[in-house]
Image: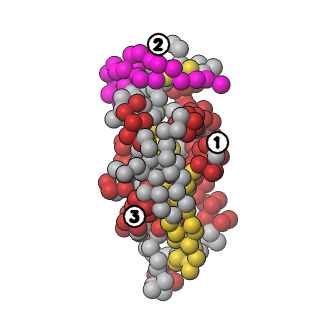
Amino acid sequence: MGRWRDGGDGDRSGDGGRGVCPRRWDGALEPDALRSALVWFGAPDGAHGIDDDGRGGISDPIGEERRERVSGRPIIIGVAGGTGSGKTTVAMRILERVGAEHVAYIPHDAYYRDLSHLPPEERTQVNFDHPDSLETELLIEHLRRLRAGEPVEIPVYDFTTHTRTDRTRRVDPAPVILVEGILVFVEPALREMFDVKLFVDTDADIRLIRRLQRDVQERGRTFESVIEQYLRTVRPMHLEFVEPSKRYADVIIPEGGFNEVAIEMVAARIRGLLDQGTLSRQEET
């Protein structure tokens, strides 16, 4: 297993320039393996990119400035990516490795708007891949309350009937708040709440196959209806909203939940903050 150490000059993968990497990961992987493991974009805290010094070092996803910003309060992490990219798997792997007792997990798709006022045949024609289909303002309010140390009751959505159920799921405050969804980087008000932004990047053909399997097996859809929806709304909305939002990511993780190296490095930094006592269940006032 590798470790983080103080670093020197590093390549800015975002703009090709040279910059200072405050901390780097020294592991057993060769530089080429690291390049395929994850891509680091220039982040506000100066975490710039994979070093080309032959030692395979990469910059710390949670640098000193960001560590100071989250000191004494929960850290909010956003995980975005296209449908079927593996973002839920990445979020679950991080949760498992950090420890469920330390993490509050919230999926953005729990906040789909209730369509019970529409006839069933009209519900299927709604564009569920457009930002307007989600009650993002409620999610933002819930994140503010969690950051203040208050529990929240998040909606439980029925994807078969496209309605909200009468039930809710209680989410208690935790040092780490993990939010996952295809559109979590699109709305500026939500995007600005994230201390760390991860984007899971997977080829379109793999994403389509996964979407087919999920919707047919888990959501009671037909093969034909999934393909029709993909061509009508999923792919166009991905190109209009999801793919452009990748530029806001601090870290891009290729290959989704199979990228053990990237997942472990992110989880290791979060565990480090927990071990140092940097994170709290509520924001200091």
Question: Which numbered marker is on residue 53?
Answer: 2
Please name the amino acid that badge 3 sits on: Glu
Residue 31 on image: x %, y %: 54, 19
* Mark closer to the chain start, 1 or 2: 2
Viewer-nearest residue: 214 or 77: 77
Q: Residue at x 47, y 67 (%)?
A: 111
Q: Residue at x 61, y 54 (%)?
A: 210
In the picture of the structure, the residue carrying the numbered disc 3 is: 141
Residue 134 on image: x %, y %: 42, 67
**Does 268 sit above or below residue 187?**
above
**Does 42 sit above or below residue 116?**
above
Left or right side of 138 for 263: right
Q: Residue at x 52, y 78 (%)?
A: 163
In the picture of the structure, the residue carrying the numbered disc 1 is: 97
* Mark closer to the chain start, 2 or 3: 2
Residue contact at pointers 2 and 3, CB within 8 angstroms: no
* Mark closer to the chain start, 3 or 1: 1
Q: Quadrant of residue 27?
A: top right
Q: Quadrant of residue 51?
A: top left
Please name the amino acid that badge 1 sits on: Arg
Q: Confirm whether the magenta stretch covers residue 117.
A: no
Residue contact at pointers 1 and 2, CB within 8 angstroms: no
Q: Element type at marker 1? A: helix
Q: CA distance from mark 1 to mark 2?
A: 30 Å
